[in-house]
Every structure is written in C-alpha cells, then in structure tokens.
Amino acid sequence: MDFFVDFAFTPQRFAVLCMLVAFIATFAITRIITRRIRAERVAAEEAAANGEAPPTEDDDAKGKVIKDIEIGGVHIHHQVWGLLFMLAAGILSFAFDFRSPWLQMLAAVFGIGAALVLDEFALWLHLDDVYWSPEGQKSVDAILATVLVMVALTLGEGPLGVSLANVDDAPWALAYAIVFNLVLVVLTLAKGKIMMAAIGFFVPLVALFGAIRLARVPSWWAGRFYATRPKKLERAQSREMRRRERIARIRARLAGHPDPPPLAASDDPGS
C-alpha cells in the first residue's frame, strides 16, 4: 500500500492521471455526440434524396441538446471551447500556486480542453472542415499519441528517459544517456514513425524498437537505403499496407468511418 501511495499519488503524478482520465472521457463523449449528429444529418439527407419527409424526434428537448452550436449564424467548433478551457487552466496555473485538490482539478480542466482541441486537430492542420473526411482521421492519431505520452508521464518517465531527480547523481552517464536516446528518436523519425518517436521521447524502449525495425514507405530512410535493396523494399511496402489497414480499422472504431469521397462528374450515374 505504501508503494502504491508513493508511486501513484504524488501530487504532480496524480494531476497527470486526472488530466489523462478527463482527456479520454471527454474524447469519448465528444465522439458519441458528433456521431449522433452525423447520423441524424445523414438520415435527413437520405430522406430528402428519396423525396420523403426528414425524420423527426418526438422528444424535441433531446434534439435541442445534441446538435451543432451556432452563434450569430456561425458554427462554433468544439475546439473553440477547448481552447478556452486550456487558456483558463494555463493562466490560473501560472497566476496561483495550487495545491491538492485544486491542482488535480485544474489538470482535469486542461485535459478536457486538450481533448476538445485535438479532436479537431485535422481541422486546424488543414484549415478546413475535414472532420468526417479521410484527412480528418489524423485527429485520432493526435489523440492516441497524446494519451500515450500522458500514460508515460503518469508512470513517471521523464523526457528521453531522464528523471530530474537523478540529474546530480551521475552527470556524465546522464549526458550519454540523453545523447543515445535522442539518437534513437531521430532514427525513428527518419524511418517515418512520428508517433513512435513522440512516445519514444518519453519511453526510450519504444524509440529503440522503432529505430531497429523496418522503415515506413515512404520515408527518408526507405528512400535512401532501400532503393537498391528490392527485397527489403518489398517487405517494407507489404508491412506498410498491413499497417495502414490496421490503423484504418482502429480509427474507424474510435472515431467512426469517414465519409466516402464525392463522385466525380464522370462517375455520376445520372450523367
């Protein structure tokens, strides 16, 4: 019990845990709501295409709660509310020296805001409303990467595997460890594994795994070293196809299937 208390409930680590729980819960709730809104929109569009009256809700109050928010005719994306949550949490954390339980509550508020912002990561990356498009699935990648980094911090891992509490114990050994771990992160990036590099920044074992495995296609490493090695290139391409299929399934389970691309004029059956 003493080990559990010492390991899990230091104020800072417990704050990160609260932030992680709030982050995951907010993402889950947000996707449930947005998928409900999308399902109603698709049903209305299909009814209109078939010349039918759009489906109606008997419970009007429920329909008014689960809908897009507009102010002055402008659709307010939930990343806006997320930014406000993050700003409030950040400003307050700098303005006051919070102790438990306020520190943990503030961390939870920041986690809520971060989830709302990163759920629309693809929108501010592309500067377009691509939420339900294939490009919008990048938001899921950002969410997963953030969750894994928060988990690493909850477990007490410092950047590049370094604990600040041990900085004065063996400075030269610590410097070598930082350089070695940083090299692993750079190699992982060169092999096109951005998420593994982000996680490996906090968990060096992940960076080591990414550095020794086959590079992704395309990546700088594959273009530089696999061009003259057809067998290795073929293995990398085969693995990349399996990886993309697996990631597509995970994305669809977490965030819903993206909308199919619109038909080109030549593909329109009515043309």
Image (cartoon, rainbow, N blue to C red):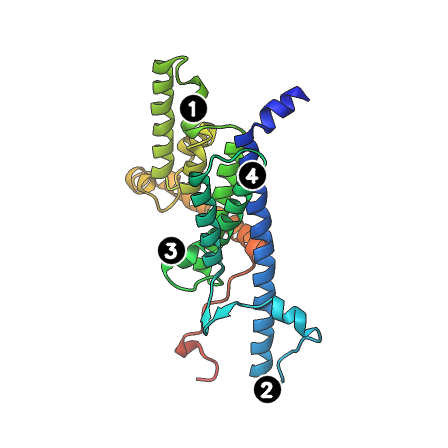
Task: Tell me the element at label 1.
Answer: loop
Look at 44% across and 26% down and name the residue there: 161
Amino acid type assigned to the residue bearing label 1 in the image: Val
Task: Mark 1 and mark 3 in contact? Answer it, CB < 8 Å.
Answer: no
**Residue placed furthest toward the top:** 169
- List x then y, in percent, for residue 158: 45, 28
Mark 3 neighbour density, 10 Å: few (under 14) some (14–19) many (20 or more)? few
Task: Mark 3 and mark 2 in contact? Answer it, CB < 8 Å.
Answer: no
* Mark 4 lies on residue: 102
Mark whose residue sits in front, 3 or 2: 3
N-terminal of the pair, mark 3 or mark 2, is 2
Nearer to me, 119 or 144: 119
Would residue 225 be seen by someone viewing this image from the given angle? yes
* Mark 2 lies on residue: 51
Would residue 239 be seen by someone viewing this image from the given angle? no
The span from disc 3 to disc 2 (Cα, nearest Å) is: 38 Å
Task: Mark 4 and mark 1 in contact? Answer it, CB < 8 Å.
Answer: no
Mark whose residue sits in front, 3 or 4: 4
Quadrant showing the N terminus: top right
